[in-house]
Image (spheres, coloured by chain):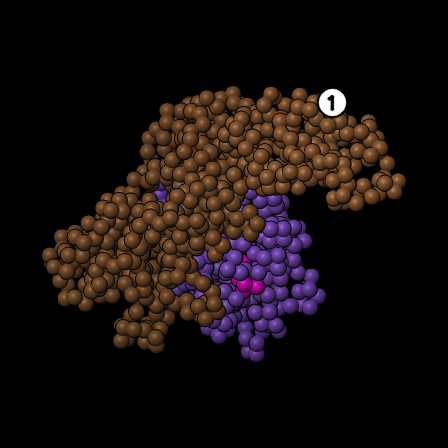
Amino acid sequence: MAHVSDLIAEDIELYLKTHENKSLLRFITCGSVDDGKSTLIGRLLYESKMLFEDQLTQLEFDSKKVGTQAGDLDFALLVDGLTAEREQGITIDVAYRFFSTDKRKFIVADTPGHEQYTRNMITGASTADVAIILIDARKGVLTQTRRHSYLVSLIGIRYVVLAINKLDMVGYSEAIYNQIDQDYRTFAKEVGLQNIVTIPMSALKGDNITELSVNTPWYRGETLMGYLENVQIEDTVEKSGVFRMPVQWVNRPNLDFRGYSGLVVRGSVKPGDAIRVLPSGRESRVARIVTQEGDLEKAISGQSITLTLTDEIDISRGDVLATTDSPPGVANQFEATVVWMTDEAMLPGRPYLMKIGTKTVTANVSTLKHKVNVNTLEHVAAAKLELNEIGVCNLSTDQLIAFDPYSEDRDTGGFILIDRLTNNTVGAGMLHSALRQPHDSSQWQDFHVNKQAHAALKGQKPFIVWFTGLSGSGKSTIAMLLERKLYSLGKHTYLLDGDTIRHGLNKDLGFTDADRIENVRRTAEVAKLLVDAGQIVLVSLISPFSAEREMARELVAQGEFFEVFVDAPIQAAEERDPKGLYKKARSGELKDFTGLDSPYEAPENSEVRIDTTAQTPEQAVEHIINYLLGIGALG
Amino acid sequence: MLTHLQRLEAESIQIMREVVAECEHPVMLYSIGKDSAVMLHLAVKAFYPSKPPFPLLHVDTTWKFREMIEFRDVMAKKLGLELIVHINPQGVEKNINPFTHGSAIHTDIWKTEGLKQALDKYGFDVAFGGARRDEEKSRAKERIFSIRSAQHRWDPKLQRPELWRLYNARKHKGESIRVFPLSNWTELDIWQYIYLNNIPIVPLYFAKERPVVERDGTLIMVDDERLPMREGEQPMMKSVRFRTLGCYPLTGAIESEANTLTAIIQEMLLTRTSERQGRLIDHDSAGSMEKKKQEGYF
């Protein structure tokens, strides 16, 4: 490439002009050190004249000292030269290398190491347009080739180069090349890879890297560099009509300007275009595309822009602006593939933070349907997902989110999961489809987040189970057991316990009749609010007077209040006396004690009566659950 | 279709906006060099018509080129941005300098310690830096969002996988994040972008007659009277320029006639020695950058 230097020397401005119009291609190389991956990357850096003299001198020196190529340049040393770091115990997971030619700038994701291969490869591949899958011509298609190809397909890379390397070691045999090519294509179909270009090469000798090799006269295709320079990637080409921009930041320098900043991840946008805001479904038109250099007439996929709209509507970070013709879906339950990236296993039911686009919500895996054996592609039943495992699961989020299937759009369909305690990124995922589309997004226009919405999101009917009974009758014990049972059934519950409330919210109240009434009233109001929030509320309170219990019942809708009378004879309660209160009352230390010197009005029409002389707490819970199931309260 | 520079620009802007949207108290490390110049230019673009919603922080060592300091003050004023200058008081008190203490201690006290002090003093939870992955081997695997412990240490085990354009900016109280919006730029990209956008840079990048002395094969500029002359040493006037800028006694000049941007780029493309060669601190010991990073250097 001597002519490049000449051009630089003779006409630097012309050179800069050509380089100014270069495009960018990101790719990943898949294969282990044995396949010659490092040699290939080193070779590409070398061939593109991206090495400086001091680096070349170092390379020559290292090649002689530790190289494996008998004094010839060992290109692998250029990328493997991190031995010092290895000795320091620093893991090398994903490294990025850069080189450019006259046509393109390239970013290579290099993922050495075998141990964390899945995690690292998925990370490196998530931003790649092209994958180069290396095969050692002597070995053919191996298990690891299948694994790499599956991961490439999973992450949605559509362009694959099958580099059949080390062809020099098999005498540049066309037959071997053809056999491997055929084997690979049969298998690639299984994992859904389509645009495959096979190139016979020797990274070490430089065959078919930048120039077609005389050693493979039977090969009529492109060189590797030729392919990388010319391949047209659909994703980077603007697709008309499917505009998407997640709002990153609301730009408000003063009261007169309200702009929405973000990166156009798909399609294009012009002033005057109708747009819809998701998930709210509100619509408006683009007024301006504002930049420091003046307004734009059009913005396309890949640009970071700031938009203003013709209407003042409520838009915040996390919303997605989209074309009205073909907006993204809106849902809170999804099927997704998750790749687990941390030592602590993923457990269904545990809540994680999920970041998708610019929105962060709480998500949990409701069902782990199966995991995938990355070597055989078999589906395996599993209760949890360990580090480097991949599983298909159902996810539910605590808020509605706008999304596209990952296969259509990486930016609106890809997400990461963050551990809420460690704040680490613990998983990555790809949304496939919504499980239950609650509404068409257009109907969310005037949607009010009410009791039904809260309840729908939790997948339950909210109600109150009100436990009444003497002190020491066993109310709290049964209520706690019931809550545990409901929780295991996947219900969102909350237990309001009399003692707890008296220590906080009602600590200003005593035990006079008036205070007892106020105690019940406040607790009932809190229970009502929780029902409005879609929660199942258990209340454990002596609540001695029927009037207040009725008042509590009337606060919520019919069918949302169930009274459980925990019926224990006072002698039995006094005998149990778990907190020693009867003793204090008898000795006069406590006044106005229910059942002794303050009355208890036993309920006559409770939904459930528990006879503590005949039922154990476990039986009591079963009794209550059967009742709730019987009337359909548990859905 | 976007050109590579347009894509890089959009990516850097997206990164800066994520930080501002998700973090409480960001600051931009302004080192006055060409990378800082590009980063600052991008910040102004990213938030326009608002001003960048964070201050600039310069960790001064008292040994920077005078022209850098002048340039710094002019730029901050011109853009109307708050500029915080932090000078490690211990460095002042102990009169830390590269001659008696060596470059390692000099860098540690003024830069590494100075930076940590400044971040703690103002309670910044995120600091933007202009480092690039192509600069040095150990940077190639650096994350764009690099989490640091409450003691500012870089723990390789704490580094999070970064997928797609999704950055995880969550952290515990006391922890901070260094964010590198120029991660995917190369030296040539930086120069090309400066050229295309007429971004102002410190005049030291352009060749000019300057007083220098030659030491161990490196040309050191005599920027003020504090540079002790060795026996028989006389400053000589040479047409020189700098590829990187730092503390003047630690920054090697190159002989050059390149006094325009195109000439600089031309020279860079033809000379073919890597940029950090002029930086004396990187040569102190093998793996030195890695070590410095763990200790909290940028």
Where A593 falls versus B176 (above or below)?
Answer: above
Viewer-proximal residue among A625 and A286: A625
Quadrant containing the N terminus of chain A is bottom left
Left or right: A500 as drawn, with respect to A456: right
Give SS at disc 1: helix
Left or right: A406 as drawn, with respect to A606: left
Report the magenta residues as a range: B292-298
Which chain did the image draw in brown? A
Viewer-proximal residue among A443 and A208: A443
Q: Is residue A476 visible?
A: no
Where A506 falls versus B25 (above or below)?
Answer: above
Residue at 16 percent of width and 66 percent of height: A170
Where A428 falls versus B95 (above or below)?
Answer: above
Amino acid type of the residue that numbered disc 1 sits on in the rendered structure: Ala
Left or right: A51 as drawn, with respect to A90: left
Viewer-proximal residue among B12 and A266: A266
**Residue occupied by mark 1:** A547
Residue at 42 percent of width and 31 percent of height: A436
Left or right: A422 as drawn, with respect to A43: right
Q: Residue furthest bottom?
A: B231
Q: Is residue A395 visible?
A: yes
